[in-house]
Amino acid sequence: MINLFTSISPLGFLLEPLTHEFMRRALMVSALVGGVCGLLSCYMTLKGWALMGDAVSHAVMPGVVIAYALGLPFSLGAFVFGVGSVALIGFVKQKSRVKEDTVIGLVFTGFFALGLVLVSKIKSNIDLMHILFGSPLGISNLDLQQTLIISFIVIAILLIFRRDLMLYCFDPTHARSIGINTGILHYLLLSVLSLAAVAGLQTVGIILVVAMLITPGATAYLLTDRFDRMNYLAVLSSSISSILGVYISYWFDIETGGSIVLVQTLIFLLAFLFAPRYGILKFTNSSSP
């Protein structure tokens, strides 16, 4: 590690990875998916849907396996199972006395276990590590196209329904009182969540995609009280951490998805400690005599 810092100039550290096509592609798709997940994470944070994001990200696994086995786009299978898991959670919640968080845990662990069983039984070229932890450095042209299309769909939906979704996340009761169909918004947001989880599969995989859907919004929530600024900060922190994570994984030969999430977590810890109004060190200093 010492030899690396002494032999590589700062400019070389930035430019050498760009000489490789796979690195340029990985940086582009990671920054894009990071920005998309960062934008959505603001709504997830305000709505308190961390568990729901975890459920959807894990529930898509059997869909990915089945799609690969049938020769279909993995995004199609993942989206179907993501939306299906949400519908099943709602059905079980309505028809039983079991609480929602328990239902979410039951559904996502059940779907995830089904995916593991399918991987072990269906003969295919599926790499389990690729599904679990992502592989932006080896993304194919077809996967890149799918990720780009999904990302732009998510961005378009969030921008078109931005005001309604923001009000729904802040105060669903008030949203209903002024005539907004919160039921449609509920399932629209869950569908967008499924799409974002599918897009995140290529960068950080099933296990870590929930971090991309939660951490940027949580970080921005500590830094501002305004939703517009929260969006900008979440997108910026998520995109920057994705780019830094890819660079770090290249130079230190570590898992790319884990590297991205660790950078996001570090940024959150810095905000947690030093945020101007809500950082714990700021609070301690201001409360001392």
Image (cartoon, grey):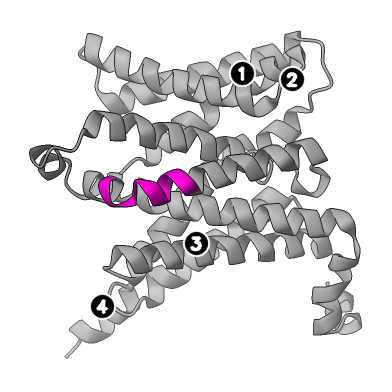
- Mark 2: few, some, or many residues within 10 Å (few <14, many ≥20)? some
* Sequence-first disc among 4 and 2: 2
Query: Which residue in the structure is indicated by mark 3?
Result: 235
Residue 243 lies in magenta, yes or no? no
Query: Which residue in the structure is indicated by mark 1?
Result: 62
- In three-dimensional space, the C-alpha distance between marks 2 and 3, rounded to whole angstroms, equals 31 Å
Three-letter code for the amino acid on which mark 4 is drawn = Phe
Three-letter code for the amino acid on which mark 1 is drawn = Pro
Q: Nearer the viewer, mark 4 or mark 3?
A: 3
Above or below 53: residue 218: below
Label 1 element class: helix
Above or below 284: residue 53: above
Name the mark on residue 68. Answer: 2
Horizontal side of residue 274 vs 13, given as left or right:
left
Total labels: the figure holds: 4
Three-letter code for the amino acid on which mark 3 is drawn = Val
Above or below 195: residue 90: above
Query: Can the viewer see residue 86 in this picture?
Result: yes
Name the mark on residue 283. Answer: 4
Tell me, yes or no, whether the two marked residues, 4 and 2, touch with CB atoms within 8 Å. no
- Mark 4: few, some, or many residues within 10 Å (few <14, many ≥20)? some
Three-letter code for the amino acid on which mark 2 is drawn = Tyr
* Sequence-first disc among 2 and 3: 2
